[in-house]
Amino acid sequence: MSDDVVLYELDESGVATITLNDPDTRNALAPDMLGGLISAFERAREEDGARCVVLASSHEKTFSSGANLGGFAADAPLVQRHFGSERFVGLFKLIGELPKPTIVAADGHVLAGALGIALACDLIVASERASFGTPEINVGTFPFMIMALIYRNVPRKKATELLLLGERWSAQEALAAGIVNKVVPAQELDAAVGEWASKLAGKSPVIMRLGKEAMRRQLDMALDDALDYLRAQLTLAMSTQDIVEGVSAFFEKREPQWKGR
């Protein structure tokens, strides 16, 4: 439906596109938007045909303005507002644990909570007109909900600069800080995202799932623990049909036909 605040579309190549679609609020992360995002990512997780997920926006100038500031001053019990923030936590975990690769098509402003959602995804391709920031400090609050994601993606001093000053960074500044992977002219954004999404959708789904889980779980392990865990995951990967097919296709100079097992 065109009036849905979150749209979902799966194409024949296996790319699922989730689109923020509430232009009147600049895609503010209100409860209905967060609920729609959770439902869409859960759908992408469960659909076997979805091999890669792209997160985009239908707004011409804004990816998302972040959380709905009206909620901070709302006349509601504090405990209810506390429970309401659970959706952010649930969404961050859902994206982080998704067994399929995720790409953000960042066009326009990516601010506050929206930056956290973008950083929860695997890759970010930004247009030259995109900007990134955590302006919460400027309105008397702080980006508590996304701090853990920022510090896991951005060097500590630059992350602290972002949080404390509340300034917006250009796409090139975000690239230098490690927030985004690639910056392209605005008119080339869809093509650049599509190229990466197509490549990712063409990989073995079972190896992608094992690899993504390993990437997430080893992140905060001690080195010795990480090495032991990753060795076990390699052995598990070697038990799949897809690793045999991939190596065979390489030597036979043909495209692999993934079995997904």
Image (tube, rainbow, N blue to C red):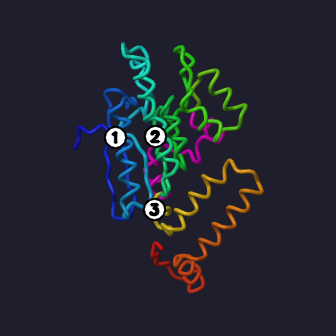
Looking at the picture, which amino acid does disc 2 mark? Answer: Gly
Tell me how far mark 2 sits from mark 3, CA to CA: 28 Å
Is 241 left, or right, of 9 in this rendering? right
CA distance for labels 1 and 3:
25 Å
Q: Closer to us: mark 2 or mark 1? A: 2
Residue type at tag 3: Ser
Q: Position of residue 46 (x, y in %)?
A: 38, 57
Q: Nearer the viewer, residue 256 or 120?
A: 120
Does residue 71 lie above or below 97 as drawn? Answer: above
Q: Amino acid at mark 1?
A: Gly
Q: Residues within 10 Å of mark 2 (few under 14, many from 20)?
A: some
Q: Which residue is mark 1?
A: 36
Q: Which residue is mark 2?
A: 90
Q: In 3D space, how far apart are the residues under numbered discs 2 and 1 (Cα atoms)?
A: 12 Å
The x, y position of residue 22, in whole percent, is: 32, 33
Residue 177 horizontal/vertical position (percent): 66, 38
Q: Residue at x 54, y 30 (%)?
A: 145
Look at the picture and state if 19 lies above or below 259: above
* Element marked by disc 1: helix
Nearer the viewer's eye, disc 2 or disc 3? Answer: 2
Q: Which residue is at the front of the view, 170 or 98?
A: 98
- The answer to which of marks 2 and 1 sits earlier in the sequence is 1
Residue hosting label 3: 198
Over which residues does the magenta segment extend? 170-196
Residue at left 38%, top 64%?
Answer: 48
Is disc 1 surrounded by few (<14), some (14 to 19) or many (20+) residues within 10 Å? Answer: some
Q: Residue furthest bottom?
A: 252
